Image (spheres, rainbow, N blue to C red):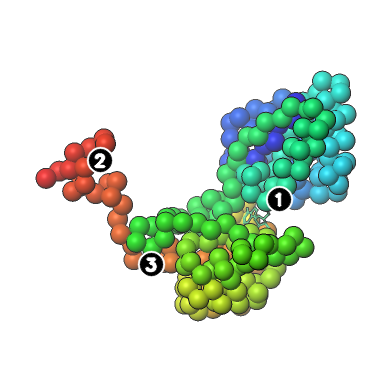
């Protein structure tokens, strides 16, 4: 059996209890390179076989899983954050389906949640935005044209931009071309959220590239954008004293 496991954003105690238990029991661990905190590998048994997938192809990853399965061993495939976001898990799962190898998926704390925590921020402020756009700039992996950063930026929603901190000039340019954010719209760079070396830099859409340069942030970072970072908002109806909910009568 293969368990895909979300390692969380970095701090080793942000993996789920289930994920940690599977790591302790694993015969084989294949972890996703430098974005997984090596401290998590200390949970592994002394005789566990450990592979770093940064140095492997998809075929090699699958071959390790296949060999383990052939002798009844359990593999943990450890992905950063939550495996469902830019995890490239689908291609592994399809290969396992072809081989008839069973698997499951244990969610993790995605880095966009870790980054919001680092900033003590809420993406979904009433009166500001009720949506979070998770996206990226096109790099070697293309982005469908209808989802270009520019068109995503036309909503003015809260946004978390992955895999793009090495191209902050372009991020800034496309965010502005979208038309809904201005040079003054709040933005932030969060480097290695929840790691000991975490760095947060608050800036604006118009100063994103400059902020990245000044603080030496060009990888392993998220770009957060939107008025949720610094704007007046409305209080939630859920806790409003004059509002009746399923669980509470209004106070007047
Ligand atoms: N599955 C992961 C994302 C993998 S893609 C998740 O759910 O978070 C890798 C990208 O994620 C990086 O380029 C960076 O943009 C972002 N990332 C991963 N961990 C991060 C962290 N601790 N802090 C900031 N960004 C992070």
> CA gap, disc 2 to disc 1?
42 Å
The mark nearer the N terminus, 2 or 1, is: 1
Tell me the quadrant of the picture where the N terminus can be found: top right
Tag in front: 2 or 1: 2
What residue would you read off at disc 1? 35
> CA gap, disc 2 to disc 3?
27 Å
Q: Does ligand 1 reach within 8 Å of label 1's beta carbon?
A: yes
Q: Which mark is residue 245?
A: 2
User: Quadrant of residue 163 in the image?
Assistant: bottom right
Residue drawn at (69%, 47%) of the image: 87
Question: Percent position (x, y) of residue 145?
Answer: 65, 66
> CA gap, disc 1 to disc 3?
32 Å
How many residues crowd mark 2 within 10 Å: few (<14), some (14–19), many (20+)?
A: few
Circles 2 and 3, Cβ within 8 Å, touching? The answer is no
Q: Is residue 30 left or right of residue 7?
A: right
Taking the view exactly as shown, the residue that stands out farthest to the front is 146
Residue 117's place in the image compared with 15, above or below, is: below
What residue would you read off at disc 3? 231
Question: Percent position (x, y) of residue 244?
Answer: 21, 42
User: Quadrant of residue 104 in the image?
Assistant: top right
Residue 62's place in the image compared with 143, above or below, is: above
Residue drawn at (70%, 68%) of the image: 166
Give the SS element for disc 1: helix
Residue 228's place in the image compared with 195, above or below, is: below
């Amino acid at each position: 059996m293969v368990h895909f496991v979300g390692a969380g954003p970095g701090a080793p105690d942000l993996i789920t209890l289930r994920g940690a238990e599977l790591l302790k029991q694993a015969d084989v661990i294949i972890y996703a390179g430098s974005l997984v905190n090596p401290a998590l590998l200390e949970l592994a048994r002394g005789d566990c076989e450990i592979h770093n997938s940064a140095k492997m192809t998809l075929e090699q990853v699958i071959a390790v899983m296949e060999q383990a399965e052939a002798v009844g061993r359990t593999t943990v495939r450890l992905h950063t954050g939550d495996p469902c976001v830019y995890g490239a898990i689908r291609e592994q799962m399809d290969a396992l389906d072809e081989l008839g190898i069973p698997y499951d998926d244990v969610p993790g704390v995605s880095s966009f949640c870790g980054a919001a925590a680092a900033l003590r921020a809420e993406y979904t402020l009433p009166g500001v935005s009720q949506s979070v756009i998770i996206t990226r700039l096109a790099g070697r992996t293309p982005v469908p044209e209808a989802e270009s950063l520019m068109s995503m930026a036309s909503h003015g929603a809260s946004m978390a931009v992955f895999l793009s901190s090495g191209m902050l000039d372009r991020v800034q340019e496309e965010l502005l071309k979208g038309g809904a954010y201005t040079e003054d719209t709040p933005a932030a760079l969060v480097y290695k959220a929840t790691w000991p070396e975490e760095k947060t830099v608050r800036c604006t859409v118009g100063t994103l590239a400059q902020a990245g340069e000044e603080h030496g942030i060009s990888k392993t970072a998220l770009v957060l954008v939107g008025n949720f970072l610094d704007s007046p908002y409305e209080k939630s109806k859920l806790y409003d004293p004059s509002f009746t909910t399923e669980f509470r009568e209004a106070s007047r």
